[in-house]
Image (cartoon, rainbow, N blue to C red):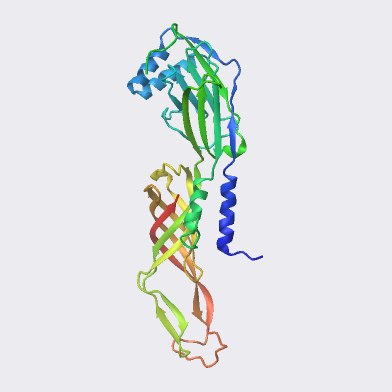
């Protein structure tokens, strides 16, 4: 049975999307000696509550870090800690501690098997809570954008006071074991309750786990060399020179390799420098290679590039000259040669 290119592409991406929809419920397990008890004589937890209530998340987060550290647990700046500050049942902000990142940042950049933890900070004497995470694997941004990109060339459808009367503060630390399908690209939906049967949800949030990437792709438009010509055989059999339009535009489909892995959802100019390689979108072979950089415009990256292309062109064999008239149609007066050209222009990259 024969399949068209369009059919094969649709089947390929359907398979990729189905493979990207693995789902699982992840339950973290307590780490050794957890929960940890801390006699908060300076009322750091209460002060943190007031800062959060006033909207100063940075100061509130700094105090939460201090509470966790004073309780005897040292945070690893390379790990991800989803933290719930259980100030009251109706005010339990959820966020993440990772290096110096903002507490309210919900982006993760790829997980190892043991890179994700859950921490509950509370003044309830029974700090054990029900926490589960619904993980949904997804395709990388490059794969999500590849089918729309190919469709350009191929037709494809494609708050109150703290409840406790004393200052004993508990830090409950738990560790996730992340299965392979959810480590690079997944959505992690957290649900936190006092216990499984409780109707009231203390905190919930969705964290976007998307790895940084080095590969992007796009279209580059370059200016052709001035005074460029082709040698062809005219309708009367004569060898003639066919001029190309001066400064004609040449379009290339390109693949980019970034020197630094980029966050495809928050791109920076300093991460945009890359090597590129591609092929001209025309009826003859002309590969291109070069270097480029660009600016993030949201859905696309617009940038500049410089490179070098190699065109397969005709050159006259010895014994033939422009203006000769060929009497034997079996005679080929041309030999194939490679013509190199410097290329400068604009490129648009996805994602």
- In the image, 182 versus 156, the foreground residue is 156
Drawn side of residue 321 relative to residue 304, left or right: right
Where does residue 178 sit, x and y in percent of width and height?
59, 33
Which residue is pictured at 52% across the width and 81% down the height? 334
Q: Which residue is drawn at 57% across and 44% down?
A: 20
Q: Determine whether 131 is above or below 249 in the image.
A: above
Q: Nearer the viewer, residue 110 or 168?
A: 168
Q: How many numbered markers are drawn?
A: 0
Residue 139 seen: yes
Q: State the image coordinates of residue 343 (x, y, percent, origin top left).
A: 41, 63
**Is residue 97 found left or right of 183 in the rendered image?**
left
Left/right of residue 133 with respect to residue 53 in the rendered view: right
Quick check: can you spot residue 97? no
Identify the image quadrant of residue 250.
bottom left
Q: Quarter holding the N terminus?
A: bottom right
In this rendering, is residue 322 above or below 277?
below
- Establish if 168 lies above or below 120: above
x then y, percent, for residue 349: 43, 53
In the image, farthest residue toward the bottom: 327
User: Is residue 178 or residue 236 the one in the foreground?
Assistant: 178
**Extreme residue in the left direction:** 54
Relative image position of residue 246 (x, y in whole percent): 35, 72
């Amino acid at each position: 049975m024969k399949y068209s290119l369009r059919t094969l592409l649709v089947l390929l991406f359907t398979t990729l999307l189905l493979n990207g929809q693995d789902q699982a419920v992840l339950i973290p397990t307590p780490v050794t000696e957890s929960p940890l008890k801390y006699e908060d004589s300076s009322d750091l937890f209460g002060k943190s509550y007031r800062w959060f209530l006033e909207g100063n998340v940075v100061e509130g987060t700094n105090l939460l870090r201090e509470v966790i550290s004073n309780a005897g647990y040292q945070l690893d700046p390379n790990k991800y800690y989803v933290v719930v500050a259980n100030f009251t049942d109706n005010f339990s902000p959820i966020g993440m501690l990772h290096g110096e990142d903002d507490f309210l940042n919900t982006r993760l950049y790829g997980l190892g098997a043991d890179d994700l933890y859950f921490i509950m900070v509370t003044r309830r004497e029974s700090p054990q809570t029900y926490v589960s995470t619904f993980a949904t694997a997804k395709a990388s941004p490059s794969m999500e954008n590849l089918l729309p990109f190919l469709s350009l060339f191929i037709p494809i459808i494609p708050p109150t006071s703290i409840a406790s009367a004393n200052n004993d503060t508990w830090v409950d630390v738990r560790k996730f074991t992340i299965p392979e399908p959810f480590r690079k690209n997944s959505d992690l939906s957290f649900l936190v309750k006092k216990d499984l049967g409780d109707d009231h949800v203390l905190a919930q949030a969705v964290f976007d786990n998307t790895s940084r990437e080095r590969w992007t792709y796009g279209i580059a438009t370059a200016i052709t060399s001035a005074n460029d010509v082709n040698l062809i055989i005219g309708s009367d059999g004569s060898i003639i020179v066919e001029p190309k339009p001066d400064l004609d535009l040449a379009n290339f489909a390109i693949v980019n390799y970034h020197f630094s892995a980029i966050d495809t959802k928050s791109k920076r100019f300093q991460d945009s420098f890359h090597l590129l390689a591609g092929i001209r979108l025309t009826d003859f072979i002309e590969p291109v290679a070069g270097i480029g950089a660009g600016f993030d415009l949201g859905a696309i990256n617009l940038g500049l590039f410089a490179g070098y292309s190699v065109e397969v062109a005709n050159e006259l064999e010895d014994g033939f000259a422009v203006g000769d008239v060929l009497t034997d149609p079996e005679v080929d007066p041309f030999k194939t040669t490679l013509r190199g050209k410097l290329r400068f222009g604009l490129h648009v990259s996805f994602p």
